[in-house]
Every structure is written in C-alpha cells, then in structure tokens.
Image (spheres, grey):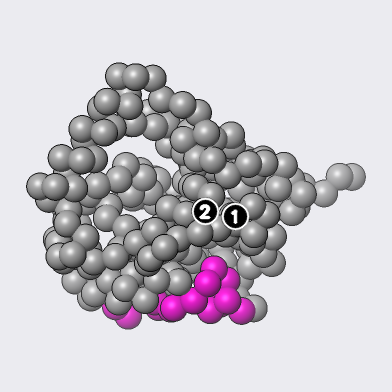
Amino acid sequence: MKGGKKLSIPRRLYKFVKYRILKLLFFRKSQPTLHKIRGRYMAVLPEVFHPGLYTTSPHLADMINSLGIRENDRVLDLGTGSGIGAVFSAQFTKHVVAVDINPNAVRCAKINALINGYEERISVRLGNLFEPVRDEVFDLIFFNPPFYLGKPKNWHETAFKGGDYPDHICHTFLRDAPKHLASDGKIHILWSSIADYPGLDEEIKENGLETAKITLKDTITEVIQIYELRHQKKQK
C-alpha cells in the first residue's frame, strides 16, 4: 500500500485542469449542492468531502454493490462524509452505523439517509473513529481515510489530512480495527497511489491483519487501491 508516487506531467496537467474547473464552476464549498452518484441523489453541505469532485466515492459505491452484503450483516462506515458508504450499504442490510468527526458530515449523512429512505437503517454518530461504537463488532468496515500527512486547518481538510506520523489517523485505525471486526469479517480501505502516509503495509501485519485482495482503478489523476483486509490466519 505504498503511496507518494509522482504523477507524469500530462496527468498533473489533467488533474490541475479538472479540479480547478470543477471547483470554480460546480462545487463551491460555501454552498450546499445536490449530486447524483450511481443513481442516488446525495446532498453535500459546506465543509464536507464532495463525492462529485473526487474520484474515490464512485468506486466505493461500486465496491459496496458488488460485495454481496447479507441482510443481517453489521456494517460500519468510518469517516462517512456525505454518507455514501452507509447509504449504499443500507440497500442490503438494516444494520448500518456511520461515523464522522466532522459535525457537518454527520448532519449531511443524516440528510442523505432521509433522502434515500434509509433513516431507520442507518445510525449516524459523531466522534473520532471507533469511539462512538465502543465494544460493538461488525462484519464489514469501510474506511476512506485521509491520504496525507499534516494537521487539518478546518473541517473540510479532515477528509485529506490525518495528522502527523506516528499519530496519523490511519495508525489509530489499524491499531483499533481488529477489536471491532468479527472473526470472519472484512475491512475495505480505499487508498491512493498519491498518498504520502508511510509504512501502512507493515502496520497491517503488525496489528494482526492480512491483505486478502487488492483492486486497482486507474482514474488518470491517481490509481485508486481498494484493499480487503481480514484477521490473520492462525498458524497451525
């Protein structure tokens, strides 16, 4: 799960033009917007990660649709943002918990649960990572983490900057995730080729997890890496 790969000059130019134009024309952080993703409408409030501007959200929705989530599976969507992971999971199960440290994101996720008719299936909670779920255990955990080092200056930046190493949010997540994962459960992390958090592969192993599968999606601006993690198999 290595990051920090530099983009080629054509890719850098494409990324600059794409994001600058979209930000200027469509996705102003100061105004609420309504965005359609994979057939579902999602409201996006100011200071919340916008699924229409960045490339990970559609891949998260596609991944969830392909997992074969069972009716009684307990699903945790950490760093839910606008609530995409929770909403798409609620199509299949009525046991969904969505968590975010950003109060604007919590409000946004609640609105989108209501818009999509899943307000009784989704419990949206405010807090940092696993703090709001305490001793709860889940069959599936989704996490679209901040890819970069550095301390966020505002709520919007919490979706991109997870703190400094070794106190980065990814470090805390991998340390605590095994305690909240069912014995046969799975964790799905969306990562990126341009991330700059170091040593994630090593931390996965150190915390009793193993990578079961990796799916790559080339979006021109970056390569999205979807990791499926499980508990390490005990050696006989």
| Residue 120, magenta (yes or no) | yes
Q: Which residue shows up at 32% across the image and 58% down it?
A: 49
Tell me residue 200's x, y (percent). Answer: 64, 44
In this picture, residue 160 sits left or right of residue 40 = right
Q: Which residue shows up at 74% across the image and 45% down it?
A: 205
Tell me residue 10's x, y (percent). Answer: 30, 19
Tell me residue 38's x, y (percent). Answer: 22, 49
In this picture, residue 145 sits left or right of residue 13 = right
- For residue 228, the mark is none
Q: Which part of the image, by quadrant, shows the N terminus?
A: top right
Q: How many marks?
A: 2
In this picture, residue 98 sits left or right of residue 187 = left
Q: In this view of the protein, which residue sits in the foreground, 181 or 133?
A: 133
Would residue 54 be visible to someone looking at this image? yes
- Magenta part of the protein: which range? 117-134
Question: Dot 2: few (<14), some (14–19), or many (≥20) neighbours within 10 Å?
Answer: some
Q: Amino acid at mark 2?
A: Gly
Residue that label 2 marks: 150
- Secondary structure type for disc 2: loop
Q: CA distance from mark 2 to mark 1?
A: 5 Å
Residue that label 1 marks: 164
| Residue 104, magenta (yes or no) | no
Farthest-out residue, left: 25
